[in-house]
Amino acid sequence: MPAFTASERPDPMKLRAPLALLAAPLLISLAACSATTADDSSATGDDTVKVAVVLGGLANDGGFNQYAADAVNALAESGDIEVQIRESVHNPSDAEPIFRQFGAEGYDLVIGWGLGFSDSVFKVAEELPETNFIATGAVDILDKATDNVETWTYATQEVGYLSGWVAGKSGLSPVAVVDGELAPFNELSYEYLSIGLADANPSAQELAPIFTGSWEDPQLANQATKAQIDLGAKLIITGAEGFTSGVIAAAKTGGVATFGASNATSSDASSVNIGVVKIDWTPTLAEAVERIVAGEFGNYTYTSTIANEGLVLGDFNLVKAAPELPSDIETLVSELAAQLASGEVTIPSVG
């Protein structure tokens, strides 16, 4: 599959996307102001690329922060890089001295993993022109790459499309949404969810979504899920947030399936949840490291999409409540990615 290109321009995103990626061990700090190095097998000599990543949350959160942590640890295990991770840096202003510290310590690549870090990344990168950085953000970040800052985002509308497409392949109907808040990033995603659902199963019905107003309250989500089930929902599409355990509990009791949760959400998740669209960031990081080794880093952007397999189906489960879901759905998703990459299939635009 071709490397990520700079030509794709997704719509704005929210950098707190769901769910786990790889099962690599996490080498994280035990103290708030410390960082960890990968084991000795990752430090193979002076030519090893030293990578540091600053996370806005926990490295094992099962979601957006773990995407980056798993990617760097996967490359560290292979011996391609030496890694340090700093987690739970919630305030962007606190990130600046950490970026400077990593630069002073001679790291070849410093990653600010979170929408709020981008301004700090560009500020420190200007001060440290010999250090390479990656800034993450919404679609506008793609226009901001510099000589020592490369930028990354993901196609949030394609997250919605693929979620709807897999939901359609389940054969379940009606389909309903339970989420925390309605925001620009997920409003667009849900518009494309309807397109993906219709493409895969034109006869599927959708119920009006319910937004509880809270990303963290599982009780509200449980009540909303029960309400959707009472209206006839057979599949609940949700997000991987603090509220998601409430969705899973209600779905299990109601005998319906879900999509969009992590297997780590609760002990019951794998029994009702079909899967989730997640970010596979390992290829992006590998490409960035290759560019550093080749002396080509800078003025470059990355977008994770279905076509380049930066957006993939993860945590797949065959569940009792979705008996018609193809057992080879992961293969079908890969085939869809190839068709999108070749142009054989295109995703219609909203509006």
Image (cartoon, grey):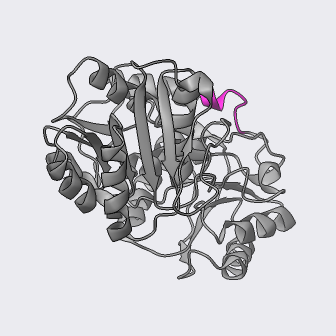
Nearer to me, 136 or 319: 136
Can you give x and y, in whole percent of width and height, for residue 243 in the image?
Answer: 65, 72
Can you give x and y, in whole percent of width and height, for residue 115 in the image?
Answer: 34, 60
Q: Answer whether residue 202 is visible to the viewer in this image.
A: no
Residue 338 falls in which quadrant of the image?
top left
Counting every numbered tag in the picture gives 0
Q: Vertically, is 206 above or below 324? A: below
For the C terminus, the image quarter is: bottom left
* Magenta segment boundaries in residue numbering: 325-331
Q: Residue at x 57, y 68 (%)?
A: 207
Can you give x and y, in whole percent of width and height, for residue 301 in the image?
Answer: 24, 38
Q: Is residue 233 left or right of residue 91?
A: right
Can you give x and y, in whole percent of width and height, for residue 32 in the image?
Answer: 56, 63
Q: Is residue 55 left or right of residue 271?
A: left
Q: Is residue 198 left or right of residue 47?
A: right
Q: Is residue 187 left or right of residue 123?
A: right
Residue 6 falls in which quadrant of the image?
top left
Q: Answer whether residue 167 is visible to the viewer in this image.
A: yes
Nearer to me, 4 or 45: 45
Q: Residue at x 62, y 31 (%)?
A: 39
Whether 330 is among the magenta residues is yes
Whether 276 is among the magenta residues is no
For the N terminus, the image quarter is: top left
